[in-house]
Image (spheres, rainbow, N blue to C red):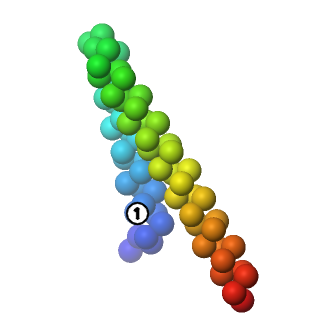
Amino acid sequence: MLSRQTINRLIIFGFLILVGFSLAKAIYHKSIMGIILAIVSLGATIYFLYILAKAQMDVEKEQEQTA
């Protein structure tokens, strides 16, 4: 059975693949709106991962202080 961390990484990786595919299709079809939406989606994903990592660091720091 896969661990929770592995499943989360597979979901994120799959989402990034879909965003990359949509960006490639938008470039192929020369769709400005598609390109903008794909780039915004990619930026939002990267920002989400940054916030998630920062939150995990804060939780670990809090646990160290209480221990």
The percent coordinates of residue 28 (x first, y second) are 31, 13
- In front: 6, or 38? 38
Residue 56 visible = yes
Q: Residue at x 50, y 45 (%)?
A: 47
The percent coordinates of residue 27 (x first, y second) are 35, 15
Image quadrant holding the C terminus, namely bottom right
> Which residue is situated farthest in the bottom direction here?
67
Tell me if residue 49 comes above or below residue 29 in the rendering.
Answer: below
Circle 1 — which element?
helix
Please tell me how crowded label 1 is: few (under 14), some (14-19), or many (20+) other residues with Cα within 10 Å: few
Tell me if residue 12 comes above or below residue 57 in the rendering.
Answer: above
The percent coordinates of residue 57 (x first, y second) are 64, 65
Tell me if residue 52 comes above or below residue 59 in the rendering.
Answer: above
Count the numbered circles shown: 1
Q: Which residue is mark 1?
A: 7
Q: Is residue 49 left or right of residue 54?
A: left
Type of the residue with mark 1: Ile
Q: Residue at x 41, y 28 (%)?
A: 39
Image quadrant holding the N terminus, namely bottom left
Tell me if residue 30 comes above or below residue 18 in the rendering.
Answer: above
The percent coordinates of residue 26 (x first, y second) are 30, 19
Q: Is residue 28 left or right of residue 10?
A: left
Q: Residue at x 46, y 36 (%)?
A: 43
